[in-house]
Amino acid sequence: METFTTKTFDIPKLSGISEKAIGEHLKLYKGYVTNSNLVLSKIKEYEKDLTANAYVLSELHRRFAFEFGGVRNHEYYFASFVGGNKPLPADSKLKIAIEKSGLTFEAWLENFKALALTRGIGWAMLYYDKGTEQLLTQWVDEQHLGHLVSASPILALDMWEHSYLFDYIPAEKKNYVEAFFANLNWEVIENNYELRIKN
């Protein structure tokens, strides 16, 4: 029985991010779903003897965090392209919230792009923290290390090399970041934010 299922995303042709890059990337996402199901099934199997399998269970739980992070991060990422490039609405609540931090939206965006260029593999993320009602930006290593507990992702930018190597060499990853935002459907991101502030 599958606990997690692979979602489909109606992604239009993108500018600066090839169909091949998206197609191969979606295969990797599917692998995270498959592996999340596999690891979870193994955990259930090994839990039948907690004493004998304590070490194996510990490692499986570590692995599950990685695989599950890969599932959810990619779902935010691919969903942000659905519907094609759309700017933030003129009355955007998200933009207003960003500018409450003292930065213009444009300055915040430049800061986020700089975060995305962090050395190493991982994700540039924008979160909403319900506890303090504020937006937080964060670098997440791999798929899971550094996620902000209880904060909800609003925007996820994949900075693993697999996300851009069909189109850009590593020294050109800044161009990939620009391409990501050139194709981003900000209405999706706005909707993510509005869902979080309501729930």
Image (spheres, rainbow, N blue to C red):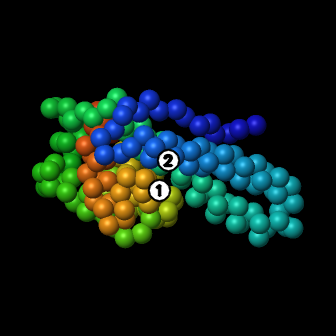
Check the picture and name the quadrant holding the C terminus.
Answer: top left
Kindly tell me whether residue 132 is visible in this rendering.
no
User: Residue drawn at (76%, 37%), measured in percent from left and top?
Assistant: 1
Does 192 appear above or below 179? Answer: above
Q: Residues within 10 Å of mark 1 (few under 14, many from 20)?
A: some
Identified by mark 2, the residue type is His
Does 18 appear above or below 157? Answer: above
Q: Along the line of sight, which residue is nearer the eye, 18 or 86?
A: 18
Q: Residues within 10 Å of mark 2 (few under 14, many from 20)?
A: some
Q: Along the line of sight, which residue is nearer the eye, 153 or 17?
A: 17
User: Residue drawn at (58%, 58%), measured in percent from left and top?
Assistant: 66
Query: For this view, does 63 lie left or right of residue 124?
Result: right
Identified by mark 1, the residue type is His
Query: For this view, does 3 lie left or right of residue 93?
Result: right
**1 and 2 marks in contact (CB < 8 Å):** yes
At mark 1, the secondary structure is helix
Picture quadrant of residue 65: bottom right
Picture quadrant of residue 49: bottom right
In percent of width and height, residue 47 lies at 81, 56
User: Residue drawn at (15%, 32%), measured in percent from left and top?
Assistant: 90
Q: Along the line of sight, which residue is nearer the eye, 58 or 16?
A: 16
The residue wearing badge 2 is 25
The residue wearing badge 1 is 162
In percent of width and height, residue 103 lies at 14, 55
